Amino acid sequence: MGNFVEDIIERDLKEGKVKGIVTRFPPEPNGCLHIGHAKAICLNYYGTAVKYGGKCNLRFDDTNPVKEDEEFVESIIDTVKWLGWKGDIYYASDYFDTMYECAVKLIKKGKAYVDDITPEKMKELRGTLTEAGKETANRNRPIEESLQLFEDMKNGKVADGALVLRAKIDMASPNINMRDPIIYRVVRARHHRQGDKWCVYPMYDFAHPLEDAVEGITHSLCSLEFEDHRPLYDWVLKECGFENPPHQYEFARLNIERTIMSKRYLKKLVDDKTVDGWDDPRMPTLAGLRRRGYTPSSIREFCERIGVAKANSLVEEGQLESCIREELNASAPRVMVVLDPLELVITNVAEGYEEQCELEINPSDKAAGTRKVTFGKRLYIEKSDFSLNPPPKYHRLTKGGVVRLKGAYIIRCTETEEENGEVKRVYAEIIEGTKSGGDSPVKAKGVIHWVNADDCIDIEARLYDYLLLAGGEDKDFSERMNPNSLIVKQAKAEKILEKAKPCESFQFMRQGYFCRDLKAKELVFNRTVGLKDGFKK
């Protein structure tokens, strides 16, 4: 069963309203893309262009030189290609001449005028949802005067903010967006592609429909907050005289629990150095998710599962986690890593003792085979896997107790070395005849992981969590920041991780899924997601 966008497209194709499907993804180059943008990319590209044999343009809405940067352009191109998009790249700034000509056309038709009103006065005269707006003294300014003033604006003869060009529509419209909106303003700032050519720049609501029309977009898919802007979209195309104009359709934007989806606030986190840049693995940006270990296929699967709807809703954070967890469970090699090392000495073997143990690379993929792991006299285990005063149902190692070392032997703890009440070293003996794979004369209720002290390597493990604490959705983001969104561990790991490539993923047994960091030169591994799926299916 298709979604409402597919229903519209299939109807338009069947009725011959369009011959081919052309969509677009129009980001502003003023920040990095986040997971909400992934939904838009997947809908415009995979859900429409690919499905119906059409095309999807990547178009930069670079109409505000004050906030835009070439760095973000390059980042966005890299990100959408990583997600799987293929197509042509366009820039709204390439259409500035066309947009300016359309604005002049509106002035000549008596559909636009230059105004010197202040922002405060404009807000006052705009009216409310229940009261009509009021006309300004300049609304009926002579056409020739508006044309000359608009040209002066373009030629840099007018100070920033002194004059604006407004569409002349209806100050009594029930839709406030139609009450003579600003369509051009003076901005004397250098544009990252156009240089100093322009001193006037179009507003988004004016530029957007023109960009779509020039590119021959058939279905302009926007998030739901643009629904009230659609009448203005249609008005611009009609008054500018475009035949077979595109149509705008709105879908619900993506909102995820405990996730910041406001680009403005994400920028604040970067500027305040709360996070380490736009690609910090705690950020919901696609660059951050990539660095954390999420794959393009897991993000596409997430977008497919949440679907496309007309009503906004809040998605459980576990849905995205579930997608990557399922993928990595099937594909990620298993390794043993000890995050909080505690030394374990085997007392009934000689110094220099070594033995090879065989462990599965991935129990979900038998074809992956097995790997050899060295078992020696000195090992490391997790501090939490030993307790002098174990709680009820504790099935790990205790003094005098037994536990199985994964892939190796059942051991019995014989003594401990303590300092100020803290266990510094554990001594244990192998119980003969208990090597994994054979018939053991002794049973152990618990199994723990370990690494060999003589050939393990040192790594840094970064345990990432959500930036926001659960609950308190009515509070400001600043009041919900999670103080434990990043915990760093100096860990001991199997030597195989020494050869891990950037972004290569592994399951750290009993710990979670980790990938080697994309940027760090050292052996740094980021936790992508834990092992437990808490999503309510």
Image (cartoon, rainbow, N blue to C red):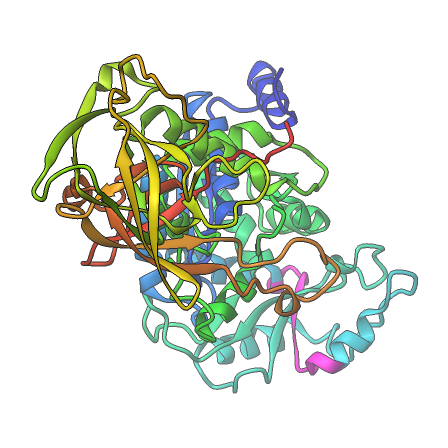
Q: Is residue 95 above or below residue 378?
A: below
Q: Residue 161 at what x, y percent from top left?
A: 58, 82
**Residue at 7 percent of width and 42 percent of height:** 352
Q: Residue 127 at what x, y percent from top left?
A: 85, 69
The magenta stretch spans which residues? 107-120
Residue 104 seen in this snapshot = no
**Residue at 70 percent of width and 54 percent of height:** 471
Q: Where does the C terminus fall, quadrant-wise?
A: top right
Q: Is residue 143 above or below residue 447?
A: below
Residue 210 seen in this snapshot = yes
Q: Nearer the viewer, residue 159 or 325?
A: 325
**Residue at 59 percent of width and 39 percent of height:** 392
Q: Is residue 175 above or below residue 379?
A: below
Q: Where does the N terminus fall, quadrant-wise?
A: top right
Left of 75 or right of it: where is 225?
Answer: right
Left of 125 or right of it: where is 207?
Answer: left
To which quarter of the image does residue 299 belong? top left
